[in-house]
Structure formats: structure tokens, C-alpha cells
Image (cartoon, rainbow, N blue to C red):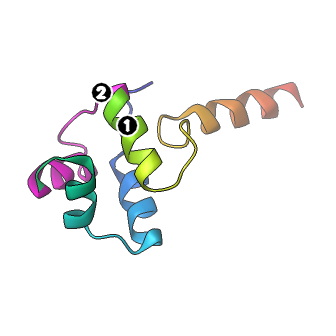
Amino acid sequence: MRDAPVGHLIRNARQKTGMTQTALASALGVSVSYINLVERDRRRLSGGKLADIASILGLESGALDGEAERRLVLDLEEL
């Protein structure tokens, strides 16, 4: 599920923390343009980078990879 668009999730989480793209890029060790491309779903992330972003933003590791959504769907199907 890592190929699923997650840019909007990253942008929303980043904005909720008040972090700028510049600050996220610096913490991740990448360029601001890389973060911009990721947030617009024009650049895919490796699992490691995704986990790093989640950690920087103070999120659980599965919060950005669709894991939470898959669990919700499974729970709803069970009901």
C-alpha cells in the first residue's frame, strides 16, 4: 500500500504540527522541493522515509501508509 497517495496525509499532519516544509525537509535531510513533490503525490516514498516522516511528525509508524484505514475497513466488514 506504500504506492497509495499519501501526500495529503503528510501535508495535513505537518500543518497540524505547525511545521513548515522547510523544517520537515531539514529534519529529514532532503530538499524542500522533495517534500513539495511528496505532498503533491509526484514523488513516491520508500518505507524508511515514510517511517522517518511519521516519527518526525510524532505519528505512529502506520499512520501514513494506509494501515489505519485497512484496519478500519476490516473492522467495518466484521460488523
Q: Can residue 17 be seen in this view?
A: yes
Q: Residues within 10 Å of mark 2 (few under 14, many from 20)?
A: few
Q: What stretch is highlighted in magenta?
A: 32-47
Instruction: Inspect the image, locate mark 1, and give the three-letter code of the amino acid beneath it.
Output: Leu
Q: From what the image shows, is residue 22 above or below residue 25?
A: below
Query: Which mark is drawn over residue 46?
Result: 2
The residue identified by callout 1 is 50
In the displayed structure, does residue 3 sit left or right of residue 41? right
User: Quadrant of the image for the N terminus?
Assistant: top left
Expressed as whole percent of the image width and height from the top left, the position of residue 58 reads: 51, 55
Q: How far apart are marks 2 and 1 (CA)?
A: 6 Å
| Label 2 with label 1: CB-CB less than 8 Å | yes
Q: Position of residue 69 (x, y in %)?
A: 61, 38
Whether 38 is drawn above or below 14: the answer is above
Where, quadrant-wise, is the C terminus in this rendering?
Answer: top right
Residue 74 painted magenta: no
- Whether residue 37 is in magenta: the answer is yes
Would residue 45 be found to the left or right of residue 59 on screen?
Answer: left
Give the x, y percent position of residue 8: 37, 54
- Image quadrant assignment for residue 41: top left
Q: In which quarter of the image is residue 19?
A: bottom left
Q: How crowded is mark 1: few (under 14 residues within 10 Å), some or many (20 or more)?
A: many
Q: Where is residue 56 in the image (x, y as percent from the top left)?
A: 41, 52
Pick the residue in front: 6 or 31. Answer: 31
Q: What element carries label 2?
A: loop
